[in-house]
Amino acid sequence: MNNKYVAFYPSRPYWAIGALEVDTAFVHQNFTELMSEIVYQKDGDDFDLAICRDGRIMLNLKACDKNLDTGIDKVVERWNIYLGYLNSFYLLLDSAAIGVMGISYFSLHEITNRDAFPLSIENGKVKSESISSESIASTYQMARYLSSYRQGLPLSIDTRLSSRHVINLKAIELAASNFEKLFSISGMQKELSSISKSISEYKVGNYETSVILSWFCAEKIVSHQWNSHLISLDRNFGDNKRINSKRLKQLTDRDYTISIIINMLELWGVLPFELYKDIEKVRVARNKIAHGDSKYIANSADACLAINSALDLVNIFYKIQVKPSLGFQVSGI
């Protein structure tokens, strides 16, 4: 088992796989050990994902361990890589809970380096960890320790424990299976992370930001499919290639705008017609935002369309199906 991880807690506490009977003498005597128990682990070639009973999600990226340069730029780079994968897993776990259990439980939000924290494990126990004092994560970090609860009262009435739902093994396995696919698709963690951030912005009513973030993802996927399709059309004509490097560069330069590319992919049958229409609507909305169109005000429908269009592209081309929770997190004033 790797001994260095970056971890986070979702914004709502949960039990992973099964709940503890917190008022029993056995649990009281072994509280921290039972809360910290790793109940699910997936150790792949590129990563080690571990989930604890109390909902802590821990990730080790093996490639990052090979370069531990302490220069600030490299440290920031490693953080960005980890956060891309952590936000992707959070989205996949949220989706899996919806798809498998039929519950929209997590209040999806962007995980930043204020929420995530490094830790090390030795002989199966936490050796050291940073406390995320600027995040709700610190509340759940301390909830592992019996000393943080009021003495003389049943643990079961404390909201840090009583409000938890169980996320079952099947949902966690689905999230982990989809997460593993990211390592065989270059840059996909960035796209899912961008969509996760887009959903977070949508939930708090920042529709313009939501549209733009999802559009960036859609544009990258469409551009990649354009490039891939052009390459697939290559043939040899004697000593000449149909799509040589010069022609490929010409077909992917600025003259071929994203609008032209979307239209061509639909005409070639690469993009379904209905999805083409949705992406085109998102493109128009994004342009109005970028050009400061005073007559345009982004709304929830625009943001939903942008999010779902990006997720449809992920599903069609990369076989990763995500069911987003698009409920609001805006209180009345």
Image (cartoon, rainbow, N blue to C red):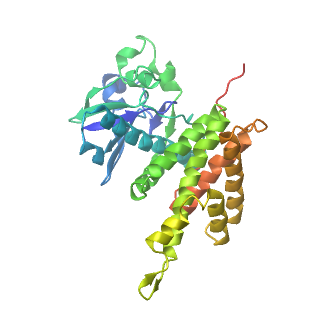
Q: Viewed as shown, does residue 316 lie left or right of 182?
A: right
Q: Residue at x 40, y 59 (%)?
A: 184
Q: Viewed as shown, does residue 240 lie left or right of 1?
A: right
Could you say where residue 130 lies in the image, as x and y percent from the top left? Answer: 32, 25
Q: Is residue 103 above or below residue 9?
A: below
Q: Is residue 71 above or below residue 195?
A: above
Is residue 52 in view? no
How many numbered marks appear?
A: 0
Q: Quadrant of the N terminus?
A: top left
Image quarter of residue 117: top left
Q: Quadrant of the C terminus?
A: top right
State the residue lying farthest toward the bottom.
238
Q: Residue at x 53, y 70 (%)?
A: 229
Could you say where residue 147 lies in the image, as x and y percent from the top left? Answer: 35, 15
Q: Viewed as shown, does residue 97 lie left or right of 178?
A: right
Looking at the image, which is closer to me, 292 or 94? 292
Q: Residue at x 48, y 82 (%)?
A: 235
Looking at the image, which is closer to me, 68 or 53? 68
State the residue lying farthest toward the left.
123
Image quarter of residue 153: top left
Is residue 153 in view? yes
Image quarter of residue 314: bottom right
Q: Is residue 162 above or below residue 276?
A: above
Looking at the image, which is closer to me, 324 or 306? 306
Could you say where residue 97 lies in the image, as x and y percent from the top left? Answer: 54, 44
Q: Residue at x 55, y 46 (%)?
A: 95
Q: Is residue 3 above or below residue 190?
A: above
Could you say where residue 239 lies in the image, as x and y percent from the top left? Answer: 41, 86
